[in-house]
Structure formats: C-alpha cells, structure tokens
Image: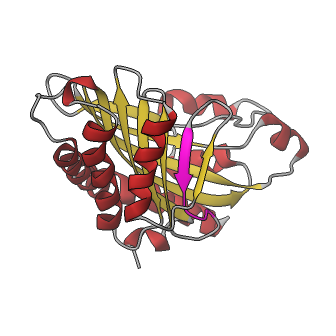
Amino acid sequence: MNRYSSLVTDFYANMNLNTEMALPNSREAVLEFFGRVQKSYPQMKNFYTRENGDFVMEEDKELPFHRWVSLEPRRICSGCVNPTDLDEAEQQHRLILELVPYMLSVSPLDCEALDYVMGFDFAYRGNHDLLVSKALGCSPAMEGLLKIDGATILNFEPNMTISLDESCRLQARLMIETRTNAYHVRRGEFPEEQISVYFTVRQYGSMDHDASFADRLSQLRAKCEELLEEFVIDEVLVPLNQAIAAS
C-alpha cells in the first residue's frame, strides 16, 4: 500500500505539458495517438470528446486505481489515481512524453511549461474553510477578522508559489482548494465533498533542441517528492488528516 493511502481519501500523480503552439486535432492524428497509448494500457477503453473539444481516454473511474490521458488545444495531460507505486505513474507519463514529439509534432522548443503534480483529496462533510483554517492556522495579520462578532469563514484557500532557481523558471506551488460555499454555511448543511491539496513543480520555457521531456519530468518528480517530504506531508497533509479525524 502506498504511504499516502493512510492519510488521504485519494491521491494522484499527474503530468501536464503546456505548448506554445496549438496541437494537432485532426481525426487521424488524435486517433493514432490515443490508439498507441491504449496499446500499452488496454484498460483505457473510455474515449470521448468534452463539450469544449478536449479529447479524453480513461479507465473505469469507479475503480480505486485508474489512469487517464487528455489532449487539449495547447496541453497534454496524463494522470494516475491511487497508484500502488508512483513508478507506475511515472512510467505512464514517460510514455506520453516519448510519443508526443513523433505523433503530435511537439518539440522541446514548443514547451511553454512542464508540470509534475501530486494531488491529495480529503473527503469531509462540514465547513471546509473553517477546518482548513483550524488545521493550518492563519497569519496574525488576519486573525483579527475572526474576532468580529458573527464572523464565519466563507473562503480560506492558502496557496503559495516559490522560485527554485535564480531564473524563476523552476517553480513550486502549494495550493489548497475547498468546496464549501455561502449557501452551505447559511443553511448549515454540508454535503460530503473533497478538500484538495495540490503540490506542483513546474519548469517554464523552451528546452534545448535535444532535451528529453521524459528525463526532465523525472527530475521534476524527484524535486517534488523531496519538497513534499520536507515541507508538505507533516505540515499540511497530517494536520488536515488529524483535524478531520477529530471533527
């Protein structure tokens, strides 16, 4: 069992490749690309087009572990939900990144940004924003607002982006997304929804002409996992888990 399984309801390892130029969207190019992916992952049997024109192929989403791939006008995404081993997810992402130069004509020069994303969902029935504020705390500059008579938190979604090099092209972002709204708070009725934590390590900008997308992703994964271990698991995931268990 993966170490995250005991802390969260679901977790996922995703890859996003954002391009400067529009990606091919002809019937032939799209079907050949997804057909090649399905050859490696035959359980990806659900292929469809979203209303906005994005193409998606995925495994059965009702299964605890499943994979998906999407093709947008200027972005290629690959996701793996609840993998038993994160190497499985990386293997999938590397396949996609090895295919796109040949099947979708994406070169390192065309790279706007490459992301490695770890996401964590916590199922919780209650005021998400209040729980996050209690679990993680808020800055002293904001604490006074909570002392106003009758004040109730309606939105508290901490996020921070930092640069990891002098050029600011390598960045890391921590973002928390809640799903409680004013209607829920006003009625005092809270459906069970997900509190999501996203941690992304992103490389901005074009790469050298002979660079490897797949090898760069492996480097981003290593940096992501290093920062998760040092700054996110004990400081964010564990407190949220404990706050939900105690509520």
Task: Residue 235: tell me if it is visible.
Answer: no
Q: Is residue 171 or residue 242 the one in the foreground?
A: 171
Q: What is the residue that sits farthest to the front in this orientation?
A: 28
Q: Judge left or right: residue 47 versus residue 30.
A: right
Residue 204 to residue 153: above or below:
above
Q: Is residue 52 magenta?
A: no
- Quadrant for residue 3, please give it: bottom left
Q: Residue at x 27, y 53 (%)?
A: 94
Q: Is residue 16 or residue 193 the one in the foreground?
A: 16
Residue 129 locus on image (x, y percent) = 65, 43
The image shows a total of numbered marks equal to 0
- Quadrant for residue 58, please give it: bottom right
**Chain part drawn in magenta:** 55-61
Residue 115 locus on image (x, y percent) = 33, 39
Q: Judge left or right: residue 53 versus residue 71.
A: right
Q: Judge left or right: residue 211 versus residue 69.
A: left
Q: What is the residue that sits farthest to the right in this orientation?
A: 187
In this figure, which colouring scheme has been used for the structure? secondary structure
Q: Is residue 60 magenta?
A: yes
Q: Is residue 65 or residue 124 the one in the foreground?
A: 65
Q: Judge left or right: residue 84 versus residue 62.
A: left
Quarter in which the N terminus is drawn: bottom left
Residue 230 to residue 212: above or below:
below
Q: Residue at x 42, y 64 (%)?
A: 41
